Image (cartoon, rainbow, N blue to C red):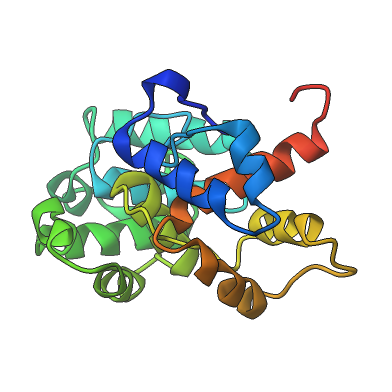
Amino acid sequence: MTTTRTGKHATKEQRAASKYLGSLDDSLAPWVRSTGPIDAYEMHLPVNVRSPLEWFSFTIASRQLSRAAATAIYNRLVAQLGGSITAERVIATDEQTMRGVGLSYPKARAIRGLAEHADDGLLELDKLAAMSDAEIHTELVALPGIGPSSAQMFMMRYLHRPDIFPAGDLGVRAAVTALDGLDKRITPKAVEHRSELWRPYRSYATSYLWGYIWELRHPAAG
């Protein structure tokens, strides 16, 4: 995943994160300094999402599919529901109709279950904004179709929380393994411990790591 550099247009938070991470005695610091401030919250989505329910609907639709296939299915779902995915519209639509756009039975059931919870107010932004990262994570993973990775990506990309770290992400682990010159890929537990140094800007560290491993693997494009 490429990194969106913000340069002279960087926000106060982006500059602070870049300055802090670049000042550490750490293998990531030189990459941070050479890259400069970045947008850690860039969604990199091929579709427009306007609510938490739409975010998670696309996430669920995307599982084990190519981006092109997931985009096509999601857009058909949006069209079927009248232009937007809302809790009321999903609940009013039977699963067979939702499966008709290309969703598997488990995915249609997960989106429907999520809509039922959203209808109860569990995905309201005002409520989420007042909660801590740990509280949000606990709430989200208790919902149907949402695992730890989906919850972390939502908190980072949609809620713009600056200190989220997806320790299980393969790209993050590959980047740390390369930067630290390890013989084998670092484990989720070890990289979680490793990330403590990057608090309170672990979302930014994550984006720098993704940018590093992407450019390491695509030197010509970089």
Question: 45 or 24: nearer the eye?
Answer: 24
Q: What percent of the width, then of the height, locates residue 215?
A: 74, 35
Tell me: residue 120, above or below residue 38.
below
Q: Quadrant of the C terminus?
A: top right
Residue 12 sits in quarter: top left
Residue situated in front as seen by the camera: 50 or 75: 50
- Determine which quarter of the picture holds residue 40: top left
For the image, the number of numbered tags is 0
Question: As rendered, which of 50 and 20 lies closer to the eye?
Answer: 20
Is 161 left, or right, of 174 in this rendering? left
Residue 2 visible in the current orientation: no
- Residue 86 relative to residue 137: left or right: left
Identity of the residue drawn at 71% across and 75% down:
187
Q: Position of residue 145 (x, y in %)?
A: 40, 65
Q: Residue at x 47, y 58 (%)?
A: 202
Query: Can residue 8 be seen by looking at this rendering?
Result: yes
Q: Residue furthest right?
A: 183
Write the residue at 28% across / 64% down.
Answer: 113
Residue placed most toward the observer, 49 or 112: 49
Q: Is residue 43 left or right of residue 82?
A: right
Q: State the residue at coordinates (66%, 78%).
A: 190
Residue 140 % position (x, y):
31, 68
Q: Position of residue 76 (x, y in %)?
A: 40, 31
Quarter that holds the N terminus = top right
Vertical side of 60 occupied by 46: above or below: above
